[in-house]
Image (cartoon, grey):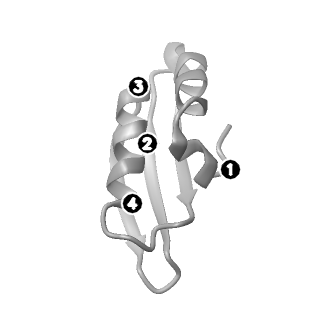
Amino acid sequence: MKALLHFGECEHDGDLQCYLGDLRRSGARIISSEINCDAETGEVLIEVADDKVNAFKEAFAQTDSADFTHFR
């Protein structure tokens, strides 16, 4: 499964890096990431093995980063 996630609250240095770390620890592979400094948002394209999607969603939902995106 591939998904494009949109994150808000990217106004501080390192915010997007924290989100990327949580995604990786939850089981996602980061394909690309981009930050829009003017809009204070970030976009991250991830990939998760089809048989690991539910485990990824459960793990990611437990992170602080989950509060900054609409992916559930």
Report the Cα–Cα distance between label 4 and label 2: 17 Å
Quick one: label 4 or label 2, which is nearer the N terminus? 4
Q: Which mark is residue 32?
A: none
Relative height, residue 71 to residue 11 (above, below): above
Quick one: label 3 or label 1, which is nearer the N terminus? 3
Report the Cα–Cα distance between label 3 and label 2: 10 Å
Quick one: label 1 or label 2, which is nearer the N terminus? 2
Labels 4, 3: front one: 4
Report the Cα–Cα distance between label 4 and label 3: 19 Å
Residue designated by label 4: 15
Report the Cα–Cα distance between label 1 and label 2: 14 Å
Quadrant where the C terminus is found in the figure: top right
Residue designated by label 2: 46
Mark 2 is surrounded, within 10 Å at the Cα level, by few (under 14), some (14 to 19) or many (20 or more) other residues, namely: many
| Disc 3 residue type (three-letter) | Gly
Labels 3, 2: front one: 3
Relative height, residue 62 to residue 18 (above, below): above
Quick one: label 3 or label 2, which is nearer the N terminus? 3
Q: Position of residue 43 (x, y in %)?
A: 47, 61
Instruction: Determine which quarter of the picture holds residue 48.
Output: top left
Relative height, residue 4 to residue 14 (above, below): above
Report the Cα–Cα distance between label 3 and label 1: 18 Å
Question: Do residues under tags 3 and 1 come within 8 Å of each other at their CB atoms?
Answer: no
